[in-house]
Image (spheres, rainbow, N blue to C red):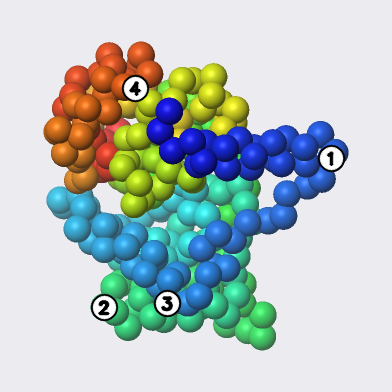
């Protein structure tokens, strides 16, 4: 078994989680990025802005558009990016409560000084920082239950879809929420998460059997380990017929060949081209 100590740490972490749930203790609200030093936060959020800039769909303009971001976490950089690009309003669909404070504003100012299109207006002026409700609405729920219909001209997520357990339901909700002619962009990371994050080889976590991986990371706390073909099928069933999958990080073939032979049955059934994809951009029209 690869990385035995990391497997044990993951099992221990889940055991603590399950004990807390059984005892009725509520988890504290999470600010996984904004709890870090400002320079580190700026580095992470600038990565999102760079990817948006580099992977921006040809011909996409947001002038006067309604935009939705799925799973922003404690990051307002994307929303500020979209408003600066002309969006009239941004809806954020996120389970954790919003994090709006002086550090958030400092990060946005740093991103703006780096040359990214960033609107500081997403945070209202005042003694206590708050979301500008004229520009930003917050929806504390899963995307699968988001009720909008034919509203948004653009929908976006960054490193979120790999955590979605029911891809078809999620994409159906996205399809329903987009207006006719609207489009979406999702940046998806199929590599290891948690204990198996970089710099570990990115496909090693595919070697663990499903029963063990389920003990390590329960639903809603894991990379689902789905593959490109699962995304294609879910998109088709949800009504998306015009979509593109564009890999931008791919494992070396020799490594992918080697690790696929050691992987669980579902991984061995994938083509080596699909199995090798670590990160990709997914774009689609309604």
Quarter of the image containing the N terminus?
Answer: top left
Q: Are marks 4 and 2 in contact (CB under 8 Å)?
A: no
Which residue has dot 1 on it? Answer: 24
Left or right, 57 with reference to 99: left
Residue 232 coordinates in the image, percent (x, y): 28, 23
Asked whether 184 or 148 is in front, the reply is: 184
Q: Are marks 4 and 1 in contact (CB under 8 Å)?
A: no
- Separation of marks 4 and 2 at Cα, in angstroms: 43 Å
Which residue has dot 4 on it? Answer: 263
- Separation of marks 3 and 1 at Cα, in angstroms: 36 Å
Mark 1 or mark 2, which is nearer to you? 1
Residue 247 coordinates in the image, percent (x, y): 20, 40
Which residue has dot 2 on it? Answer: 115
- For the point 49% across and 45% down, which residue is it? 194
- Separation of marks 4 and 3 at Cα, in angstroms: 38 Å
Q: Are marks 2 and 3 in contact (CB under 8 Å)?
A: no
Q: Are marks 4 and 3 in contact (CB under 8 Å)?
A: no
Mark 4 or 1, nearer chain start: 1
In the depicted structure, whether residue 246 falls above or below residue 82: above
Residue 96 coordinates in the image, percent (x, y): 62, 52
In the depicted structure, whether residue 77 falls above or below residue 6: below
* Residue 283 visible in rendering: no
Q: Quadrant of residue 254?
A: top left
Mark 3 or 1, nearer chain start: 1
Which residue has dot 3 on it? Answer: 39
């Amino acid at each position: 078994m690869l990385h035995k100590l990391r497997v044990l740490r993951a099992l221990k972490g889940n055991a603590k989680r399950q004990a807390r749930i059984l005892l009725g203790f509520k988890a504290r609200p999470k600010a996984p990025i904004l709890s870090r030093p400002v320079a580190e936060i700026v580095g992470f959020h600038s990565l999102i802005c760079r990817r948006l800039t580099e992977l921006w769909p040809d011909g996409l303009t947001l002038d006067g558009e309604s935009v939705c971001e799925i799973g922003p976490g404690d990051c307002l950089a994307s929303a500020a990016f979209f408003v600066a690009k002309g969006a009239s309003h941004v809806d954020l669909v996120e389970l954790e409560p919003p994090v709006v404070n002086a550090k958030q504003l400092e990060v946005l100012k740093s991103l703006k000084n780096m040359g990214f299109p960033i609107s500081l207006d997403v945070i209202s002026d005042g003694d206590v920082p708050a979301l500008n409700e004229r520009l930003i609405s917050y929806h504390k729920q899963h995307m699968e239950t988001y009720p909008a219909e034919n509203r948004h001209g653009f929908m976006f997520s960054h490193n979120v879809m790999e955590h979605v357990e029911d891809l078809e339901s999620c994409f159906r909700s996205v399809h329903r929420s987009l207006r006719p002619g609207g489009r979406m962009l999702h940046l998806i990371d199929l590599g290891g998460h948690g204990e198996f994050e970089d710099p570990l080889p990115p496909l090693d976590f595919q070697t663990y059997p499903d029963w063990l991986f389920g003990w390590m990371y329960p639903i809603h706390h894991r990379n689902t380990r789905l593959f490109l073909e699962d995304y294609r099928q879910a998109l088709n069933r949800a009504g998306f017929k015009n979509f593109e999958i564009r890999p931008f990080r791919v494992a070396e073939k020799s490594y992918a060949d080697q690790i696929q032979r050691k992987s669980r049955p579902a991984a061995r059934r994938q083509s080596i081209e699909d199995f090798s994809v670590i990160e990709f951009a997914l774009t689609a029209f309604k």
